[in-house]
Amino acid sequence: MPLQQLVEYFNDRLEQEHNSGFRPFILRDGSVHALFGPICIGSVLKPVRETLRSAHSIGHMAQLSVATHSAQTIQNGELENLLALSPAPAGQPESIINFDRLSRAVHMLNYLPQAHRDEVLFLDVDPRHILGVKEDHGAYFEEVIVKCGLETRNVAISMTVNNVYARYYQALLKGLQNYQRRDYRLALKFDYHTLEKTAVELISRAAPDFVGLSAQHLERIRDNKLPEKLQQLNGLVDSIAGRSIMLDVDDKRSAALARQTGFDLVQGEYFEHSLPVAAEPPSSVRYAQQKHGRL
């Protein structure tokens, strides 16, 4: 189905579901955007590559491009404040779930023109979304995937593991397993400081298809055992038949560390300068006339 028809289909669906004029999706210059209150969201698709065959991509990680109606890019930390303008109070599950679902639909639609059957689209899911949905995780989005002509196995649900949610690991694990039952792939992402005992246990119990570690700030870590610990992480990932990814590889040193310590996959600007998809919002959109809704 042509992209324009898919955009209209999902707009019609939301309009009918909520009995309102809420039509958040916009197709402009070949890219899909969506409105969420005063902001317009798009996608940046970043290739995930084989470490030893960097010319070979196994999929893409989708990241948000967020801007206001004036095309001013939202700075880090401002997104949480803007979520406060949504129908549900900021931080409450309803608001997070709506925004998460809308974002993933945008990413899926922007991914379609370059989708390949053997590749994977990595989609971030907020832990608060997983905790806010009580059962049947992934059911709603599965309908979107099928309508787009793909399968759940083409999608990796990606969650950043944060110590803030350590006491909720059991509930998060249950939600992640619900995704796995629907044949979604699973990716857990960490930074070096979150690789504690509870995180290792989560990896062992969840058995994700992918485990990512951010290379950001690794050069600042004064730990002679850093290479050894990274090798141990890769050994753990191998033991659950997963694949490890070094994320945010922006320089030669990080790329060399990924190779030396046995990471299967890499992602980062060192290998390419990704071009954003839908980085700029449509300037002619009449935001004041749009109403909030739920996806």
Image (tube, grey):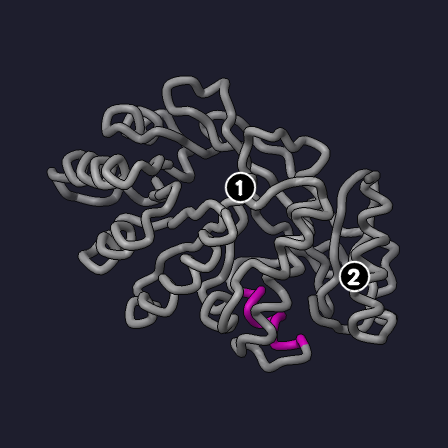
Q: Nearer the viewer, mark 1 or mark 2?
A: 1
Q: Position of residue 188 (x, y in %)?
A: 38, 50
- Looking at the rendered structure, the kind of residue marked 1 is Arg
Which mark identifies residue 24?
A: 2
Q: Position of residue 137 (x, y in %)?
A: 52, 62
Closer-to-camera residue (76/119): 119
Mark 1 vs 2: CB contact within 8 A: no
Is 46 displayed left or right of 16 in the figure? left
Q: Quadrant of the N terminus?
A: top right
Name the residue rendered at 42%, 47% in the picture.
Answer: 187
Q: Secondary structure of the magenta portion, mostly?
A: helix
Which corner quadrant of the image does residue 74 belong to? bottom right
Segment colored magenta: 78-86
Which corner quadrant of the image does residue 9 belong to? bottom right
Which residue carries the number 1 mark? Answer: 153
Closer-to-camera residue (54/147): 147
Q: SS of the residue at dot 1?
A: helix
Q: Position of residue 253 (x, y in %)?
A: 31, 27
On the question of residue 126 being in view, the answer is yes
Count of numbered marks: 2
Q: Assess whether residue 151 is covered by the magenta stretch.
A: no
Name the residue rendered at 34%, 38% in the picture.
Answer: 242
Q: Position of residue 124 (x, y in %)?
A: 51, 52
Is 284 displayed left or right of 161 in the figure? right
Name the residue rendered at 74%, 72% in the picture.
Answer: 293
